[in-house]
Image: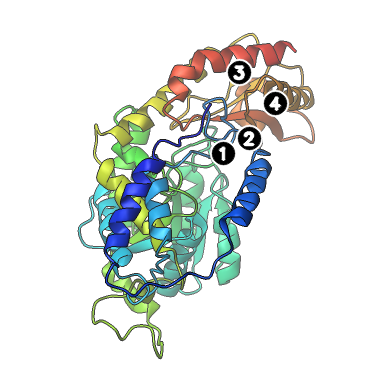
Amino acid sequence: MALDRDSLEILARALGQLDGGFSHLPEFAPAASGNERLEEVLLALARKLQDNYPYFHPLYAGQMLKPPHPVARLAYSLAMYVNPNNHALDGGRATSALEKEAVAEIAAMFGWKEFLGHLAGGGTMANLEALWVAGRLGPGRTIVASEQAHYTHHRISSVLQIPFEKIETDRFARMDMDALEKRLARGDVGTVVASMGTTATGSVDPLPEILQLREKYEFRVHADAAYGGYFALTSNLSEKAAASFARIGEADSIVIDPHKHGLQPYGCGCVVFCDPGVGRLYKHDSPYTYFSSAELHLGEISLECSRPGAAAAALWATQKLLPLERGGELARGLEKGREAALQFYRAVKDGEIFDAAFQPELDILCFVPRGGSLGEISAKSRRIFHAAAREGLHLAVAELPARFWPRLGRESGRETVACLRSVLMKPEHLAWMPEVLARLKRAARA
């Protein structure tokens, strides 16, 4: 598959437009190495970059890797000729405005008009800010998340020195509501993290039930939608998952990662708070940074300091080309990925070769080969993983609770099983599903 090069002509024309805006400046010669040496280094880099899995191709379905949209790649490159810094308006005047506009469009996707938010280096930093705010508002109170929530919540809580506990999940990898209420009844819970798409299985915590418990026990709800947030735009979710996404706007804070389903380059995360008043918690002094304008500088509401304005430019351009709306091109792409996962599920569930854990809620499917014991199944999973790679099909291996597959039974001293995991987040996965299944079957026979 040839990598996109046609769009470089568009970039050249855009560079001419950008350069024209600075034509009044005196000429100068940039201090840079000659093009001959530059080409030598870039060609060497190109050879080294070939040592990668084909993340852009639909035969890659292993991890959460999705190529940025061409407009995002071009917009990022264009902005890099200026290299703005969105910490203060002095360093990123145009891109700060673009960031505010793009983040407002993300907040509107969840129904918010009044909010506080900004971009971050990724989901980890965005979640850190959400839990930092939660800790400041409820000092000493415990943060809880499901045992299938991303490990970053435990790690962040440790960094922030906030008590953290895991809540059991049901057999569909969703937070167990009985276990949550038992923990809430003991008191001292300040924040419940609702995973809107776990990274292992794509499971969606039952947000309506969590919000109902909030009325009784009074805690903050943080929706970690780093992976699944854009599925709020789709129309082919299950009834239960759709009900959770329909109420995500009732959370106190939301994190979403545009560098996953938002078609952005790494790293681009986003955190939004429903209460703009939390901005007071960020108050800090700088002797030089924030005095060029009375307008809000993004560094005044962010724990990060320097941040790439190019990320804001890329996100803004993408959302202008692909608006965040139901029925739009972005939403249709997500729906194709989900339909691919459902087709994959129907092909392997209750089969002679494989068994799926449960119907996927988003676009991630976990499944195991048939076997006589958990140890044998785990060994088979790893062998098929390598055999599939030899077939050009790239999956992942995950270690998950065996109880997600009730028919596997129990084994003394063993509670987990190594399974195969596919992330079908590219729209092209739907058309390629017959080829994916054919290669998987050949790998299983091998």
The answer to which image quadrant residue 421 occupies is: top right
**Residue type marked 3:** Asp
Which of pointers 3 and 2 indicates the residue nearer the eye? 2
Residue where numbered disc 3 is placed? 355
Q: Amino acid at mark 2?
A: Tyr
Q: Are marks 3 and 2 in contact (CB under 8 Å)?
A: no
User: Which one is closest to the eye, mark 1 or mark 2?
Assistant: 2
Label 2 crowd bin: few (<14), some (14–19), many (20+), radius 10 Å? some
Dot 3 or dot 2, earlier in sequence: 2
Distance in Å between CA atoms under marks 3 and 1: 17 Å
For the residues carrying marks 3 and 1, which lies nearer the camera in this image? 1
Residue 352 at x, y percent in the picture? 64, 8
Determine if residue 84 is in view.
Answer: yes
Q: Measuring 36% from the left and 58% from the top, which residue is drawn there?
A: 312
Q: Badge 2 is on which residue?
A: 53
In this view, 284 is above or below 198:
below
Q: Give whichever of 78, 118 is nearer the camera.
A: 78
How far separated are the C-alphas under marks 3 and 2?
26 Å
Q: Which residue is mark 1?
A: 200
Q: CA distance from mark 3 to mark 4?
A: 15 Å
In which quadrant of the rendered view does residue 271 lie? Answer: bottom left
Q: Are marks 3 and 4 in contact (CB under 8 Å)?
A: no
Q: Between 263 and 85, which is closer to the camera in this rendering?
A: 85
